[in-house]
Amino acid sequence: MAVTLPDESASEYARFSLYNSPYAAHDGGCAIDCYPGTLRDGRTEVAPSPVSGTVLETKTVRAPPKPYAPADDYLLLLECDGPGDLEGLVARVLHVDPTVSAGGRIERGDSLGRLVRAGFFAPWVDNHLHVGFRRPDQNPYRASGSLPIELESELRSLEWDGTGTVVATGKTYVVLDSPIHPAPGEYFVGVRADEGEILDGGLSHYEGGGVLGRSGVGETVVSLNGDRLGVADGRTIAWDDVVVTANGDPITGLSLFCARDGDFGAKLICPDREFEVGEHVKVRVRSSDAVGR
């Protein structure tokens, strides 16, 4: 059983990803990370609810220890009465320090609290709500077990030749000026694979990713600009043993997601490399063996 996230829920956010995570909760696209705003540095704290309904419980949970992050995160359980097919399901929301409490009524778009950056976050990850959906008879506390998520929203893939100019830098990443969203705010876009679908995930700093918009079953090779990335089984990709390069040198990876904001552009994960604003970059994906030679 899959659950469809209504467009009115997704449109509360500037960006989303089903697969751009190292955690098992996202396997098979069974959770969605929702980014309310980018602010270029990704540090917004607003946390609008993706659903309407009743707060069942808020719970403090321990996060993986990281020197740059607080020890605690938070789990919110929401009994959904909408929108759409979400009615009757339980939403699991992480990474929000709640200002709501059990028994409280919420509407879609209402503030759930303040976003937090606990130890689940890699340093290059923007602030977001982690959201999953379960049937009422399922255990809501286990990290894995949420239902696969489909998107009602219009998704358009953007061709990208792997090049761009650096327009923003962080300590662990840079953002390029391409591909360009042709109509910000009107629909979600993502980087197009050679096969036509949208790529989603951490290439290849996480184990796998996804191809959004793929309707077929079975296995197929997925590539970008002629570079083989891996094999998709359904919409889930297992990356090959590959390395992302920028101007010929290895970097940590390429962050792939969907966005409807005008600041969309390729995001390169490169904590060990420095790039300057205005620098031209060419990205390729090579086999590890080829890079090692």
Image (tube, rainbow, N blue to C red):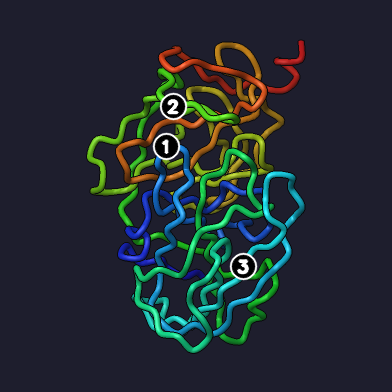
Say which of 286 and 255 sits in front: 255
Q: Amino acid at mark 1?
A: Arg
Q: Find residue 20 and report its horizontal and vertical position in percent.
A: 57, 46
Q: Is residue 234 above or below residue 55?
A: above
In-front residue for pair 148/184? 184
Q: Quadrant of residue 138?
A: bottom right
Q: Amino acid at mark 3?
A: Tyr
> Mark 3 near mark 1, Cβ–Cβ under 8 Å?
no
Q: Residue at x 40, y 26 (%)?
A: 160
Residue 191 visible in the displayed image: yes
Image height check: is 111 above or below 34?
Answer: below
Q: Is residue 148 visible?
A: no
At label 2, counting other C-alpha atoms closer than 10 Å, the crowd grade (few under 14, some 14-19, many 20 or more) is some
Q: Given the image, on which type of amino acid does mark 2 rest?
A: Ala
Name which quarter of the figure residue 146 lies in: bottom right
Residue with the mark numbered 1? 40
Residue at which label 3 appears? 74
- Front one among 170 and 108: 170
Q: Earlier in the sequence, mark 2 or mark 1?
A: 1
Q: Which residue is mark 2?
A: 168
Mark 2 and mark 1 in contact? Answer it, CB < 8 Å. Answer: yes
